[in-house]
Amino acid sequence: MAVLEVINLKVEFPTRRGVLTAVDEVSLSIDAGEILGVVGESGAGKSLTGAAVVGLLEPPGEVAGGQVFLQGRDITHLPENEMRQIRGDQIGVIFQDPLTSLNPLYTIGRQLTETILTHMKLSPAQAKDKAISLLHEVGIPAPEMRLNAFPHEFSGGMRQRVVIALALCCDPSVIIADEPTTALDVSVQAQIIALLKKLAKEKGVAMMLVTHDMGVIAEAADRVAVMYSGRLAEVGDVRKVIDEPKHPYTVGLMGSIPQIGQNLKKLPNIPGSMPRLNTRPLGCAFESRCTKSSEICKTKIPALSSVPEENRQAACWLFQEENEYA
């Protein structure tokens, strides 16, 4: 059984001009020790998917359909007090900017120990020992001394390590990491990616890694889910998707990344832009930018289905019979 399973998730935003669907029929599953990379350009719905899973959607956003299962338990519409307990206990969250995740007025030690004491039955001394152990585990030198430091006394990379330690406080079974390396320089990015991979494998944590950076996905993820305009475009093993993309959007995405040894005057790009939520076409949202579109693409949305002879899925009419979803 998957540790985290998302089935036909739909996120909507009611507005004065109608309801906008930001995430539409998204289904994902993550096993213990697995890192699932969720990638897509800005506005694709990847961060909203992660926020919906942990119950952190900003109003008026709401889960309008689908289910989220954590170790077989439906947590989709739990009361906020129950969801808050699950967030700290069974699901850890790593946000993009560590400065917004840490209280600037509290020491690192206080923030860690308060989180531990809230969710675990430990004495203050035991909580302090666990906090020191966590800081050591995420690679912060001299953790006994740094326990009394404030967030502004840490570098960006060290602050992100503290945020990871906070996410690990109660030994969660799932971690949602939303753009955890975006605000960091390249060398620190590599260290954080290595740390996330180590934690997933050694602790058996199921991790959803949300990012727009295919380099991060290639280095960290086991499987990748490519999102476009609120829907899944392609899901599969990370190496297969990167080396042999099937969906035309993924092909364009991979083609726009420079390769070592290429001698190009200009990188290929995908013409046009992703449609706004209120101007989505009737059919495939990528149709106007696709070089392989046909008439059915303009009127019908392709479902995510298996690519023949491969262990992956793509939402494209190239891999489906027209009458299958007619």
Image (spheres, helix red, strand yellow):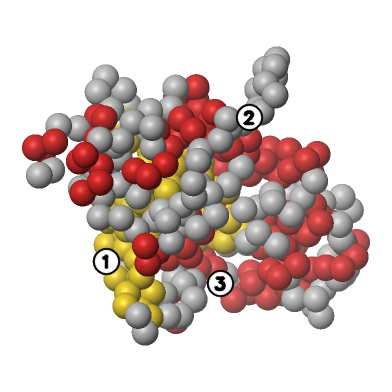
Q: In this figure, which residue is indicated by the disc labeled 2? A: 267
Name the one closer to the observer, 16 or 207.
16
Q: Earlier in the sequence, mark 3 or mark 1?
A: 1
**Which residue corresponds to the image point at 74% horizontal and 54% vertical from the top-left?**
183
Q: In this figure, which residue is indicated by the disc labeled 3? A: 119
Q: Earlier in the sequence, mark 2 or mark 3?
A: 3
Spatial CA span between label 3 and label 1: 30 Å
- Res 86 visible: no
Q: Is residue 156 above or below residue 80?
A: above
- Marks 2 and 1: CB-CB under 8 Å? no
- Res 149 visible: yes
Residue 62 percent across, percent down from the top left: 37, 74
**What secondary structure is marked by label 2?**
loop
- Disc 1 marks a residue whose amino acid type is Gly
**Picture quadrant where residue 177 is located:** bottom right
The nearer-to-camera label among 3 and 1 is 1
**What secondary structure is marked by label 3?**
helix
Spatial CA span between label 2 and label 3: 50 Å
Q: Dot 3 surroundings within 10 Å: few (below 14), some, or many (20 or more)?
A: some
Name the one closer to the observer, 321 or 27.
321
Q: In this figure, which residue is indicated by the disc labeled 1? A: 65
Is 11 situated left or right of 207 in this image?
left
